Image (cartoon, rainbow, N blue to C red):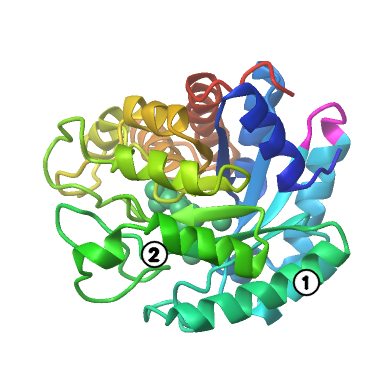
Amino acid sequence: AFVSLRQVLDHAAEHGYGVPAFNVNNLEQVQAIMEAAQATQSPVILQASAGARKYAGEAYLRHLILAAVETHPDIPVVLHQDHGASPAVCVQAIRSGFTSVMMDGSLKADAKTPAPYDYNVEVTRTVCEIAHAVGVSVEGELGCLGSLESGQAGEEDGVGAEGTLSHDQLLTDPQEAKAFVAATGVDALAIAIGTSHGAYKFTRPPTGDILAIDRIAAIHAAIPDTHLVMHGSSSVPQEWLAIIREYGGELPETYGVPVEEIRRGIASGVRKVNIDTDIRLAMTGAMRQLFATKRSEFDPRKALEAARTAAQGVCAQRFEAFGCAGMA
Ligand code: G3H
Ligand code: 13P
Ligand code: NA
Ligand code: ZN
């Protein structure tokens, strides 16, 4: 059944676990996540970016998720708009049946330029008024995502600030978070604590202190009733990078956020953990491997099936690791 983000994250807070929020763009990704959730009895957050709607089309996306809920009636499903760039995008999502929307006012509507605090408050408060009137949850964002190692936002063509960010911009301020929540009424808040979007987060193996854990705890203490969201939470599995390279892919050395670090984040108050890149890497690795090892194969279902199985494995691991399994 469809549920709101607030419902799922209230339960997660009560029981001290985290919920992965997986980005979806197509049939196989939706199936992989739902099958992993069914097998582990986990609640599900499916999120669609502006890029997903552009790729699949709004009606196709909506009906894929309706099919997921029909196929798995006992699994709670949140349909969440990821990185809404304006109130208009969020209203469109609500009209389309989303049960949760993110108004990302940390960046201007171009999704590239850091926005002033007052602009962020204004657009986010507007979305809260509209969404809450119809029972839809709202996630806001305060601070700019980026690696504390490099000051870079990470992604080149997706969501993220351009240029180098200052240390101040890279860490959400707890007192500002408190004021932001009071002024807007958000249910959940994405915070900047050292993660960045995409596959190129860190150039060296993480040493275990890549997340600003003390900062997470301080923000959680300042806004205990607002659910903390960690974007850029892919772990960039080295085993999938190796398979991609073995079968012709050319990806440079790169590292993500270790699952153990995410578990520390959850223990300090993180409730929603956004993951897109890991599913992309697993699916691409599986498809490359399938076509490289079965050279006479031309049925795309064989590759898509391998991709779906690979993605399902990643999702099941995250449901288990974040303490979400058994909570549906
Ligand atoms: O936050 C970014 C997500 O990974 C979505 O990426 O804009 O390529 O769909 P996308
Ligand atoms: P990754 O690129 O680390 O998977 O992060 C995805 C994300 O934050 C979507 O909002
Ligand atoms: Na989001
Ligand atoms: Zn994000």
Residue beneath label 2, please?
143
The kind of residue on which mark 2 rests is Gly
User: Which residue corresponds to the image point at 79% horizontal and 58% vertical from the top-left?
Assistant: 136
Q: Is residue 311 left or right of residue 129?
A: left
Q: Is the residue marked 1 within 8 Å of ligand 3, measured from its CB?
A: no
Q: Is residue 69 visible?
A: yes
SS at mark 2?
A: loop
**Local crowd size for mark 1, using a 10 Å CA cut-off: few (<14), some (14–19), many (≥20):** some
User: Which residue corresponds to the image point at 47% horizontal and 82% vertical from the top-left?
Assistant: 108
Q: Assign ligand 3 to one image quadrant.
A: bottom right
In this view, the residue in front, 49 or 247, is 49
Mark 1 or mark 2, earlier in chain: 1
SS at mark 1?
A: helix
The kind of residue on which mark 1 rests is Glu
Residue beneath label 1, please?
129
Q: Is residue 152 visible?
A: no
Q: Is residue 72 magenta?
A: yes
Q: Looking at the rendering, in which quadrant would you find the N terminus?
A: top right
Expressed as whole percent of the image width and height from the top left, the position of residue 188 reads: 60, 52
How far apart marks 1 and 2 lie (CA) works out to 22 Å
**Local crowd size for mark 2, using a 10 Å CA cut-off: few (<14), some (14–19), many (≥20):** many
Q: Is the residue marked 2 within 8 Å of ligand 4, measured from its CB?
A: no
Q: Is residue 39 left or right of residue 273?
A: right
Expressed as whole percent of the image width and height from the top left, the position of residue 26 reads: 63, 52
Q: Tell me which segment is drawn in magenta.
A: 71-76
Q: Is residue 12 above or below residue 222?
A: above
Expressed as whole percent of the image width and height from the top left, the position of residue 79 reads: 73, 51
Which of the 4 image quadrants contains residue 213? top left
Which of the 4 image quadrants contains residue 217? top left
User: Which residue corresponds to the image point at 76% horizontal and 40% vertical from the top-left?
Assistant: 7
